[in-house]
Structure formats: C-alpha cells, structure tokens
Image: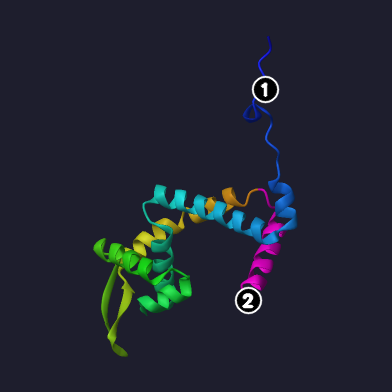
Amino acid sequence: MATPTKTADRARPTYFPQLAAERLDIALCRASAAVARAADARAGEEGLGVGQHLVLQMLDAVGPCSQQTLSEELRIDRSVMVSVCDDLEQEGLVRRERNPRDRRSYAVTITDAGRRRLAQAQTSIPAFLEDTFQPLTPDERDQLSTLLGKLLKIDT
C-alpha cells in the first residue's frame, strides 16, 4: 500500500521572486539584510564589528566627534553607539575627552592604535565587496550606487 505524500515532501512554491518583482521595497529590504549578514560575518572574521569599523572610519576622515554626531551620521542607535564607543575605548582604539566647544559632551577621538587597526580592517573590504556584489557587472554596480544615492538623497 502506497503512503500518502506529505505536504512537506512536495516541492515548495517559490513565491518570493514574484513578491520581489511586485514589491521593490521588500526586495530592497531583503537585499539589504543579506548584505548586512555578509558584512557581519566578515567583520566577525576580522575581529572588528561593522559599527566599530564605521566609527573608526568616520573619526579618521572627519576628526573628533560627539557620540551623538557619530550616531546621527552613521545611523546607529544612540544606545548602541555607547556600547560601540565603550568597546573601542577599552581596546585603546579611541579615547573620549571633554568636548572643548561643549563641556557637557565628550568628543570621541581615534588613537594611533585605532588608525592602525582601521588600516588593517580596510584591506579586506575590496574582497568583501567583490564577493558580495559578484553577480553584478561593474556598470550595474555603478548604476546601483547611483540609484541608492537617489533613494537616500545623497549627491553622488
């Protein structure tokens, strides 16, 4: 006697491609989440979290900043930013000093050790970007960058 086929044994319908075609917002969110997971995995291998990397990169580029400025510019929640800066400070990669323009706040400054750690971490970014965006041609990557800039209202 043949056993009935269970629903779980049947091929699952593939609805997501249709959904992604109909709902660009859903497709973009899923793509963003996939890239974020890949970045977190790579960051874990490097021993420097994505948020930590971004903070070091911004401090190196623009100089000392308040945690509030870092939080706003990098779009990292303020409570998370405190933890990111605490971890970086414990590792000697940044230091907090009273902000000379506003004694109520602290300015976060990258240290020489932080610059060295940032330079080390930066070496893996080209390979990460190549792996992550490998399905796209260079022209498609440029186009994606332009389109995302428009969505984010960033002049590229």
Residue 54 percent coordinates (x, y): 44, 65
Residue ID at (32%, 69%): 82
Distance from Cα at disc 1 to Cα at disc 2 = 52 Å
Asked if residue 45 can be seen in this view, the reply is: yes
- Is 27 in the magenta? no
Quadrant of the frame with the C terminus = bottom right
Q: Is residue 67 above or below residue 101?
A: above
Residue 123 percent coordinates (x, y): 46, 55
Q: Is residue 65 above or below residue 111?
A: below
Q: Residue beneath label 1, please?
A: 5
Residue ID at (65%, 65%): 145
Q: State left or right for residue 94 relative to residue 69.
A: left
Q: Amino acid at mark 2?
A: Lys
Dot 1: within a 10 Å radius of its alpha carbon, few (fewer than 14), some, or many (20 or more) residues? few
Q: Which residues are magenta?
A: 135-154
The colour mode here is rainbow
Dominant secondary structure of the magenta stretch? helix
Asked if residue 100 can be seen in this view, the reply is: no
Residue 142 percent coordinates (x, y): 68, 63
- Is 148 in the magenta? yes
Q: Residue beneath label 2, please?
A: 153
Residue ID at (74%, 54%): 21
Q: Is residue 39 above or below residue 55?
A: above
Residue 112 percent coordinates (x, y): 30, 67
